[in-house]
Image (cartoon, grey):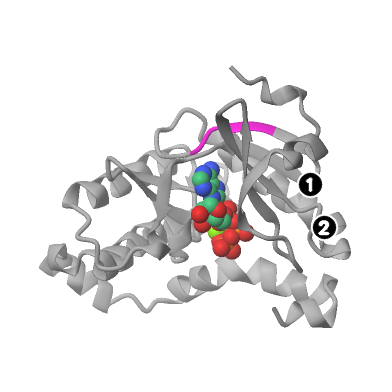
Amino acid sequence: MVDWGIYSLAELREHATTSYRQAHGSRPDVLLIEINGEHAVLKDFSHSDRGFSHLIGPLLVFRETRSLARLEGLGGIPRLIRRVNRYAFLTDAIEGTPASQLRNCDCPQSFFDSLHDLLDSMHARGVTHCDLRSSGNTLIDKQQRPWLVDFVASIHQGSRWNLPARWIFKQFVQVDHSAVLKLKKRLSPGLLTQEELAILNDDRGLIERLARKMGRGTRKLTRQLFTSKSQSRK
Ligand SMILES: Nc1ncnc2c1ncn2[C@@H]1O[C@H](COP(=O)(O)OP(=O)(O)OP(=O)(O)O)[C@@H](O)[C@H]1O
Ligand SMILES: [Mg+2]
């Protein structure tokens, strides 16, 4: 079994076999790493734009690894293997296809049920994903089970007395579930129930719009603040 803890960032990068995302501007490298036939995924901001990489990268790594640590042991969430340094972390690699790459795929009802169940378990641990509108963040494995990646926009439930934070958390719980309905509408529209159609039609709230922006917001703002003009147009 590979001891992922002994490799430096440079050594891990040398073992990259696939690039899911290439670093540029505010984007990290997302790389599939293979060592002795075993796989892991490296998310690494060290090759993003310099200003971004140094100032915001560590914050995003902290945010995402904090959520992954809180969700440890939950099926459907890749295990955090380790924070490699301030700029990069390593997770289990999921063998699955991002929902963004699927068209009308006739995903079974069990897939959407599992996804709602997964969200319930995640929310019970006090974490909302907040960026499930971006369908590349939902993967479907061969057994047609869901997996969630990319917790950079996730938020945590406020303490018991922090009522505004708890209210916001509750709204994002709804937003996560409504993203599943959007996905269902795109992938398996025939499975939508009357109730789900009504929810989709009624899906125009303020928080909903906020959530849509939240997945992109941090990145857009920081891109404008910290990256060069040529990169910020990418
Ligand atoms: N643990 C993982 N196992 C398998 N594939 C993964 C894993 N994590 C990420 N990926 C792949 O890499 C892609 C990008 O990862 P991620 O969403 O975390 O990065 P990102 O920079 O936020 O990209 P985007 O802006 O497209 O959301 C995912 O859509 C997925 O295809
Ligand atoms: Mg993503």
- Residue 7 occupies which quadrant of the picture? top right
The residue pinned by badge 1 equals 87
- Earlier along the polypeptide chain: callout 1 or callout 2? 2
Up-down: is 187 above or below 63?
Answer: below
Q: Secondary structure at mark 2?
A: helix
* Amino acid, disc 2: Ser
Please state which of residues 46 and 19 is positioned toward the viewer in this rendering: 19
Q: Is residue 142 left or right of residue 54?
A: left
Give the alpha-carbon distance from disc 1 to disc 2, as whole Å. 7 Å
- Residue 38 occupies which quadrant of the picture? top right
Q: Main secondary structure of the magenta part?
A: strand
Q: Residues within 10 Å of mark 2 (few under 14, many from 20)?
A: many
Q: Secondary structure at mark 1?
A: loop
**CB atoms of marks 1 and 2 within 8 Å:** yes
Image location (x, y in percent) of residue 184: 26, 63
Image location (x, y in percent) of residue 40: 59, 36
Q: Is residue 92 visible?
A: yes
Membership of 80 in magenta stretch: yes
Q: Classify mark 2 as within 8 Å of ligand 1 or not, answering yes or no.
A: no
Which residue is at 47% across, 60% downward?
Answer: 136
Which residue is at 77% across, 54% downward?
Answer: 57
Q: Is residue 108 left or right of residue 57?
A: left
Q: Which residues are magenta?
A: 78-82
Identify the image quadrant of the C terminus.
Answer: bottom right
The residue pinned by badge 2 equals 53
Membership of 92 in magenta stretch: no
Please state which of residues 8 and 65 is positioned toward the viewer in this rendering: 8
